[in-house]
Image: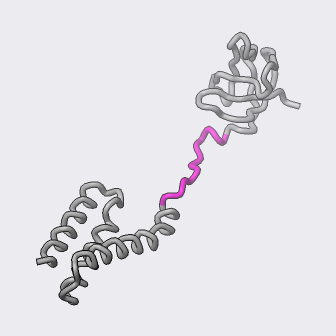
Amino acid sequence: MEVFVWAMVFVFFVIAEIVSIQLVSIWFAVGALITLLCTYFFEGIPILGQLFIFIISSSVFLAISIPYLKKRHSTVHVSTNSDLDVGKQAVVIEDINMDSGTGRVTLNGVDWSALPAVKGDIIPSGSIVVVEKVQGAKLIVSLKK
């Protein structure tokens, strides 16, 4: 009878894993499968013993798979084309002044909003600046030295 119950538990967790596709219940499915096999081959294991086997086997499988999952899901910085603009020179076409909220530059023929790299700096129109950072749709720039 217990074999049938563990078979249902195994099927339940497999279906839950298929539905979620998030590796949420796969450890419980393996634990249920191991408990099912132990219960089938070693008859007479009490319910508490079966639960112990289920918990331990699920925990061990989880502990073994954590390093693999960390490698697989580690965040990797994906470069965008905007990263290529860092270090390039641009021409200021509107005074860059954080206090008044103004500032535009032209970089490779494209008009960008711009902010000074050093707060409080005012960069006049016509100046050549270097792109320090791309922040969304704005360039953080400093005067060319």
Q: Tell me which residue sits at (74%, 17%) in the image.
A: 96
Magenta segment, which residues?
73-84
Q: Tell me which residue sits at (28%, 61%) in the image.
A: 17
Q: Is residue 59 left or right of residue 144?
A: left
Q: Is residue 31 left or right of residue 123?
A: left
Q: Is residue 62 magenta?
A: no
Q: Is residue 74 magenta?
A: yes
- Does residue 43 sit above or below 63 in this rendering? below
- Does residue 126 sit above or below 26 in this rendering? above
Instruction: Please identify the dominant SS of the magenta region.
Output: loop
* Foreground pick, 21 / 16: 16
Residue 88 position by quadrant: top right
Q: Tell me which residue sits at (52%, 64%) in the image.
A: 71
Residue 32: give x, y in percent of width and height. 26, 73
- In the rendered image, the quadrant that contains the C terminus is top right
Residue placed furthest toward the left: 1
Residue 120: give x, y in percent of width and height. 80, 19
